[in-house]
Amino acid sequence: MQKRPLGFWSVWALAVGTMIGSGVLLVPASLAPFGLLSMGGWVLGATGASAIIFVFARLAGRTRRDGGPYVYVQEAFGDVAGFAIAWLYWVSFWASIPVVAITFAGYLSVFVPALAHNMMAQAASALTLIAVLTFVNIRGLKEMSVVQIVMTLLKIVPLVAIVGAALLFGTPQNLPPFNPSQQPLLPQLAAVTLITLWPFTGFEAAVSSAGSIRDPERTIPRALTAAVILVAVIYLCASFAVMLLLTPEQLAHSEAPFADAAAALGAWGPSLIAAGALVATAGSLNGIIFACGQMPMAVAGDGRAPAWMAKLNKGGAPYLSLLISAALGAFLLLMNYSRGLVGAYTFMLQMATATSLVYYFFCVLAEIKHSWRTARIRTLVALFAALYCGFAMIGSGYQALLWSGVLTLAGVPVYFLCRPAQVGRLRASTAEKVR
């Protein structure tokens, strides 16, 4: 019988730990130009993300196969669609690696001031984090799970502390205008929606390894539901707290907004929040790197990716998939760091989120196909999730969509190169059935 080392708390920690990380910690600086309109984006982002997570919970309850979105779309629409979604999923996750690592470098500057305006040193510290957590994941599932649970619990503490600081020391006078740029509301809200969706992405790391989860049909939906409720409440409260503690000008130019806001707690405040932020980003990156290994392993196991990507070490980790994913993420980080910390963060956030939206959309279509004749409420939720994905894509901008398209097309040769292996496996399976 296959050993399943991941239970409810491991899955919950993967979902919460991957969501709470770079998103909530640096996003307030990206949202500063939008003023109080950004809070509307948070509400819309939380609502849309909840609908998407509800869809994933339903889809996860129907299978025990590894692969998450790849499996859901493949079973609904066939092998070609399944491979395309698997490729997009993988691209979006390794493209997320530098986003989270950049945030880690930004908060590390609280303890190492020399990093603050030194792009080379920031890049080096981000690359070091990627290397360390790739090693943790290569060690095996059990080690990854323990690290993730501990980091998830620790990262919630500083966010609660910043909310407490806002209640004691915050002032409504710091709140920005509703729409400082005076631009039309709909395009502004679309842009804000894309940015606020990013902190909720990554939850799908919890569904990518159903074969390693105990009773996945019940465990995954329960863990995802508990995770999104907690994360939505924390995000809304913590983001508003930062606005109460920092002026719009301070927020717009901050590379570590939560640490700057924590100055209200005294001299020790920024250090406490920055330490929590380092734990949060490391925990998020740990979950992202885990997912980077699971998806290629699942696709390769079906003969639709190079067989070496499914090769496991003694700890049960797909070490080659992990290594190549981490290397690609590190390369993307180096390619974009010339934009500066916040500039590189915002661009790669938009690119990774735009890519995620595409496979979210197709997973939602898979749920609609399953439910539209038998479950009207679930179908309506899925339709809302589809509309939300489309609206968020409008806000991604042509540059992020163009890069996402280029990375997607890069998967076409891989699919056709692997077709001989697919055909060979299918023939062998057919011959075995005949015998």
Image: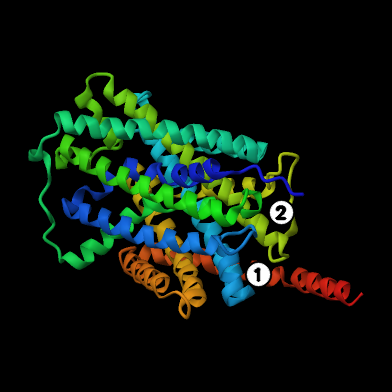
Residue at the spot of label 1: 415
Say which of 265 and 339 sits in front. Answer: 265
Q: Secondary structure at mark 2?
A: helix
> At 70% across and 69% down in the image, what residue appears?
417
Q: Amino acid at mark 1?
A: Tyr
Q: Amino acid at mark 2?
A: Ala
Numbered mark located on residue 395 in the image: none
Say which of 214 and 251 sits in front. Answer: 214
Marks 1 and 2, how far apart at CA:
16 Å
Task: Left or right? Give the position of 284 relative to 250.
Answer: right
Q: Are marks 1 and 2 in contact (CB under 8 Å)?
A: no
Task: Left or right? Give the position of 318 relative to 56.
Answer: right
Give how far across and how far down residue 413 sits, in percent.
64, 69
Against 30, is 245 above or below? above
Against 143, is 79 above or below? below
Residue 410 showing in the rendered view: no
Residue at the spot of label 2: 310
Give how far across and how far down residue 385 sits, in percent.
38, 67
Looking at the image, tell me whether mark 1 or mark 2 is earlier in sequence order: 2
Give how far across and how far down residue 310 sits, in percent.
71, 54
